[in-house]
Amino acid sequence: MTNIDEMSINAIRVLSADAIQKANSGHPGLPLGTAPTAYELWTNHMNYNPADPKWENRDRFVLSGGHGSMLLYSLFHLLGIGNLSLDDVKNFRQMGSKTPGHPEYGHTVGVEATTGPLGQGMAMAVGMAMAEAHLASVFNKDGYNVVDHYTYVLGGDGCMMEGISSECFSLAGTLGLSKLIVFYDSNNISIEGSTDIAFTENVMKRFEAFGFQTIEVADGNDIEAIGKAIEEAKADKERPSLIKVNTLIGYGCPAKQGKASAHGEPLGIDNVAALKENLNWPCKGDFEVPQEVYDHYKEIAARMAEPEKEWNKLFAEYCEKFPEMKELWDKYYNGCDMSDLFNSEEYLAKPEKAEATRSSSGTILNMIKNLMPNLIGGSADLAPSNKTNMKDAGDFSKENYAGTNLHFGVREQAMAAIGNGLALHGGLRPFVATFFVFSDYTKPMARLTSLMKLPVVYVFTHDSIGVGEDGPTHEPIEQLAAFRSMPDFTVFRPCDRTETALAWEYAIESKDEPTALVLTRQNLPQMAGSSKEALKGAYILEDSDKETPDGIIIASGSEVNLAVSAKAELKNAGIDVRVVSMPSMDVFEKQSDEYKESVLPKSVRKRVAVEALSDFGWYRYVGLDGKVICMKTFGASGPANQLFEHFGFTVENVVNTVKSLF
Amino acid sequence: MTNIDEMSINAIRVLSADAIQKANSGHPGLPLGTAPTAYELWTNHMNYNPADPKWENRDRFVLSGGHGSMLLYSLFHLLGIGNLSLDDVKNFRQMGSKTPGHPEYGHTVGVEATTGPLGQGMAMAVGMAMAEAHLASVFNKDGYNVVDHYTYVLGGDGCMMEGISSECFSLAGTLGLSKLIVFYDSNNISIEGSTDIAFTENVMKRFEAFGFQTIEVADGNDIEAIGKAIEEAKADKERPSLIKVNTLIGYGCPAKQGKASAHGEPLGIDNVAALKENLNWPCKGDFEVPQEVYDHYKEIAARMAEPEKEWNKLFAEYCEKFPEMKELWDKYYNGCDMSDLFNSEEYLAKPEKAEATRSSSGTILNMIKNLMPNLIGGSADLAPSNKTNMKDAGDFSKENYAGTNLHFGVREQAMAAIGNGLALHGGLRPFVATFFVFSDYTKPMARLTSLMKLPVVYVFTHDSIGVGEDGPTHEPIEQLAAFRSMPDFTVFRPCDRTETALAWEYAIESKDEPTALVLTRQNLPQMAGSSKEALKGAYILEDSDKETPDGIIIASGSEVNLAVSAKAELKNAGIDVRVVSMPSMDVFEKQSDEYKESVLPKSVRKRVAVEALSDFGWYRYVGLDGKVICMKTFGASGPANQLFEHFGFTVENVVNTVKSLF
C-alpha cells in the first residue's frame, strides 16, 4: 500500500470521526474498520462515474450496515459524488442536512438505498442483482452487453444475524446471481459485547450451504488482499460471492478498537486526537484533509469517468442497430403509457358473475402485463392462491433470467426487500404478494418502500374471516390499521372488479408511492354503483333520495354489499341512508375538503361503518356518535359464511345498528 | 415394521384424509408423509403421559408445519390425549370444534403451541428448550433430575425457508441446546411446485454451520431408521440435532403423492378410496379404524403413563429433601405474590429529576426481579439502550443456563417467538425488548402471543422522533396503531416513572394477555398528577375548575407535559381545559361506560389529542369535531428537541389548536 493510499483511506476515517464527534452522535466503528475495503472497492473495482451517479450501467454499492453512513458520506465527498461538500459533512445528523444519520435514498445523491434496519440492505442488493440479470437477458445482444454491472453490498454481524439475510441469500444462491458480491465485515462485536454471546455460527459454511463462493480476507487493512478477493469473486461466473473481511471495529483508535463501545457512540475528543496521531494523520484541525489526498481522489474520479464514455458509444451503436430494442428500453426506463388500457371499456367492464377480488386482480394484472413488459413480480410461494401468475411471462430462474414471474419461496421479508431492490435498480415495475395476514412480515420493508417513495405494488389476498377454515392465525384483523397508519403508503380494499381495476390503475400510475391491494378469497357480487369515483378513495355508491341523508353507511370491500342490502331494508323502514364505498382511506384523505364534505357532510352524525376487520381508525369517519360493525376479537376456524354470520356481518345487524342511532 | 405398526401408522393417514375430505378443506400432504415419523417418535421415544398432558416434565412436541394439524388430531384421538373423540375429528375445521384448521394452544388439549405461520413453531421450540435448560440448572440436584425433557419440533421446507428458522437455530447452536431435536420433513415440494424453483440450498450444511448434529433418514417410511436417528440425536449431549427425513408428500395416494396439489387441498373422494386401497386399509367406511389399532394405541398409552409415576415419586422425595427448592418451584410455577412490592411506597416513589421512561423501566424491572426469580428475558442486541439488563441475574449461555439475562443477538423475530416458547413451557415469566421501530419485526409473533393468551412483556424503547439523529428509519410513527389495533394485546405508553411502574405492574399481574411498554429515549419530567389511576388506561391528570370543562386535551407519554403546560397557558386566556393522560387505550376501553363518560364526557366536544406519532386511532376520542396534533409524515435526522419543535410538538401549537376550536 502506497503512502497516498494510506492517507486516502485514513481521510475516510478521520472525516468520519470528526463528523460524528461534532454531531455528538453516530457510529464510528464501521467506518473506521471498513475504510480500506470501501477504498479498494470504489477506487479500483467499482464501475462507476462519480460525475454521473445515475448512469444506468453503473455498479451498485449498498451499505447494509446503514449506521456506518459516514463511510459513504466521506467517500462521496472525497470522490465528488453529488457535490457533497465539506459543510455537508460537518452537518452530519443535523436537521435538513444532506448527511442524515442513516443513508436516505432520494435525499443524498449516490445513496442507492435507504438502510438502517439491519439486513434489509442485503436483500435489496439481491433485488438489484436480479434486476441486472433480468435486464441483461432482455437487452443484451452479441457484442453489445449494454447491461453489465455488479452489485456490491457491505454489512456486519448484525445483518448476518437477521433472518432476512438467510432468506435472500438462499434465494440468491438458488438463482445463481453471480454478479452479486457480499462483503461481510467480521469484527466479532455487537452492541451487547462479543459475538460469542449469541452468534458463534460458521457464517462461511452457511453461505456455502446457500451455494455461494466464499473468500476470506484475513486482514481488513490489506487492500491488496481485498483487491484479490474482489477479482476472485468476479471471476466466478456461476455463483454469488461472499467476501469475509476480518476487521477491528474502530480500527485506529487505541482506546476503542475492538470494543463494543466503538460501535455506536462518538469516540470522544481525546480519542479522536489519539486516532489522528495513531494514524500519522498530518493535519491538526477538524475536518482537515491534505490537498494531495483531494487531488488523488480527483484523479481517480477522472479515471472512473472513462467507462461510461465507452458505454455511451456502445449504447448509441446498439440503439442504431436495434431500434426496436431502443423502443423497448424506453418503455422500461421511462414508463409505458397505459392510458389506452385504463380508459378502455374493456378495462372497466363489469363481469356478469360474482368474483373474488383476488380473481379480479389476476385478470387485471394480466391485462396490464400485456402492455407493460417490465412488470415483474411474484408471491412468497402462494401464487396460485394470490392469483399473481402472469401467463406466458416465463419463470425467472438461473436458466431463464428473462422470466418475469418471480418465485420467492416462503420468504416474505426477503420478497418485500427484493421488491424494493428491483424498484431501486431502475427499469422495472415490481409487485410482491402473499396472504394479507402475512403482510405483518413485510411491514418493516414496506416502511422503507414508503420512505424511499417507490411505487412497488403489494398484493395481499385472503383479507378477513372470509379465509374460513384456516382459522385465526390466517385471518387478518389489525393488518389494515397497520398499513393505513403508515405515511405515504396507499391501501385499497376494493369491493368488486371495477374497484379492483381502479386500484391497479392507481398503483401503476403512482410514481412515488407504494400501493397495497387488499383482496378477498371469496366471491363478491359486482356492485352496480361502483365507478371511476373509486379513484377518489371514497364515493357515494348509492345515495339517499333526501337532500340530507338520514344517515350514512360506510363500507369497504366485502362489506359494501351488506351496506347496499341494508339500505334497501332501511328504506322500507322509513330510514333513507346514503351508502359510501370507501376503498381507500389514504386516497380519500388527499381529496379537497369540499369533496370530503360532499361525501360525508359534517352535519350528518348518524353514521355506521362496516368492515370485517378491526374498527381501529374508523372513528375518524363515524365520530363520537357513530358506530362501527367490526371484529373485536380474533377470528375462528369454520366455513366462511358461518363466520360472517357468527361475527355479526349480516344485513340484519347493519340494519339494527343503524336503527339504534335513531 | 410389524403389521400392527403399519396399521397404526395408516390409521393416522386415513383419519387425516377422511377428516379433510369431510371438511372439504385442509392439508393432507404433511400428515400422509410424516405419519411414520410421528408414530415412531410418540410411541417409542416421547416421554409423555397421554392421560396427563400437563405433566411438567413431559417432552414437548411442536408441529411447526401447523397446516398439518390432522397429524396431531389423529394421534391425539388414537392415544386418547384430551379425550379427543371421533366426533371431534369428524368436526375438523368446523365452527366451535376442538379440531380447528391450525392447532390452537389453549383450545385443544395437547397442543403445545399455536402454529400456522411457518417457522414460528421452530423458534417457539427453541424457547421451550431454553426453558428446560434453565429450569434444569436451577432445580436439579445430584440424583434428582426433576427437570429433564426433550423438545421435538417438526416442520418442512416452508419453515426452513423462513428467516426466523435461521435466527433461532443459529442461536440454538450457539447455546448448545442439546435437548432440542428438529425434524425436517424434506419432500421437495412447496405450493408453487418443486423446491428447485426457489430453494436449492444445502439445508444440512446450513445446520452444521449453526453447530447442529445432522442426521439423515433416507426413507421416511422406515420407522427403524427414524428410531435410530432419534437415539443418535439424544446421544449427543453437546449440540441440538437436525433429523432430515426424506418423505413423499401425500404418501399412499397414488394420484397425489409427490405433487404440489397434495399439500393444501382435499384428496378428493376417489383418491381417498384409492389411498385406503393402496395402503391395504381393512375398513371400508369413513373414519373407521380397526379395533385392534385402538387396542394397540391403548396399550401404548398405558405404557407411556409409567414414567410420570416414577417422576412423581422422585419429585416427592426431592420436595422432602429440599423444601426450599419446593418453595422456589411453587414460585416459578404458581407465580409470586407481588402485592407487597406493588403496594409499597417505594414502588410509586416519584424521583426528583426528569428521567427517560426507558430508565424508569430499567429501575422498575430490577425491583421486580428482586422478588421474581423466574423473570427472564433480554433484548435483540440492544440491552444497554433498552435498559433491560437485570443486575446480578447472570447471562444465559451454554456455560451458564442459570442466567436469566438472555442475549438474542440481532434477531427480533426469533426473540419474540422464543419469548412465546418460554411462556408456553411453563414456570417462567419472559420479556423481550428492542427499539420500538423494530417492533414491526416482532408483530407476527406478538399476534400469536395474543392468540395464545400469554402474558409476555414487550419492552419497546426509543418511541418517537425523540430518537433524534438516527433519523426516520429509527423513528416510530405507525407502530402504536399496529399494536393497539391487535385484539387482546395491551399497550402502555407511560408519561413518567409512576405510570411506568404501573405499566409494569399491569404487565406482571396479567395472567392471559401480553403487554407492551412503549418508552422514551429522552428524559421526561415527573408529572405531579400521575397516579394509580393510570391502571384504568386513562384518567384525569389535571382537571378544569369548571364542572364541565371548556375542552379536553388528551395525551400520552412524552406529550403529557405539553398538555399540562398548554392548560396553564389556556387558563390565562380564559379557556379552562381538562388534561387527560391516556397511557393505554386498550385498558381504557375495558372500563365501565360510567368511568369512560366521567373522564371524557360526551357533551364536551372540543377535544385535542397530542401524540408524537400517527393520529390513526385517535379519532375515537376526539370525534368529528376535535383535532389531533400528530406526525403526518415520517420523521427526520436531527437533534430531538429541534425535531419536536419542527413537527409542531410545542406548547404554543397545542394552545393554538385548542383555541381554534372556539
Image (cartoon, coloured by chain):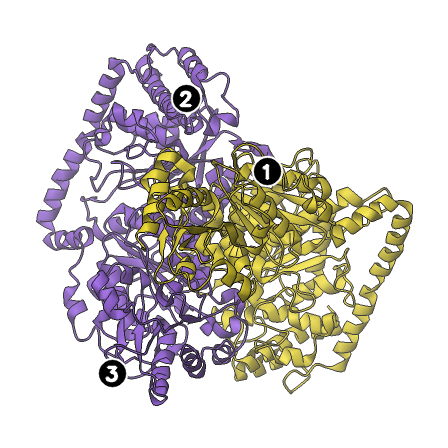
Chain colours: A yellow, B purple
Q: Where residue A337 sits in the image (x, y, percent)?
A: 74, 50
Q: How far apart are the two marked residues, 2 and 3, measured between alpha carbons?
A: 80 Å
The quarter of the rendered structure image containing the N terminus of chain A is bottom right
Q: Which of marks 2 and 3 is nearer the N terminus?
A: 2
Residue at image location 59% in from the left, 33% down from the top: B196
Residue toward you, B622 or A55: B622
Look at the numbered disc 2 and give the secondary structure of its residue: loop
The chain letter for the residue carrying disc 1 is A
Residue toward you, B545 or B400: B545
Residue toward you, A541 or B458: A541
Give the side of residue A638 with respect to residue A302, left or right: left
Residue at image location 62% in from the left, 76% down from the top: A97
Look at the numbered disc 1 and give the secondary structure of its residue: loop
Q: Name the residue under label 2.
A: B222
Which amino acid, mark 1? Lys
Mark 2 vs mark 3, foreground winner is 3
The quarter of the rendered structure image containing the C terminus of chain A is bottom left
Q: How far apart are the two marked residues, 3 and 1, measured between alpha carbons?
A: 61 Å
- Determine if marks 2 and 3 fall on one subunit: yes
Quarter of image, res A12: bottom right
Q: Mark 3 points at which residue?
A: B545
> Which residue appears farthest toward the left when viewing the image?
B320
Give the side of residue B434 with respect to residue A161, left or right: left
The chain letter for the residue carrying disc 3 is B
Q: Mark 1 points at which residue?
A: A350
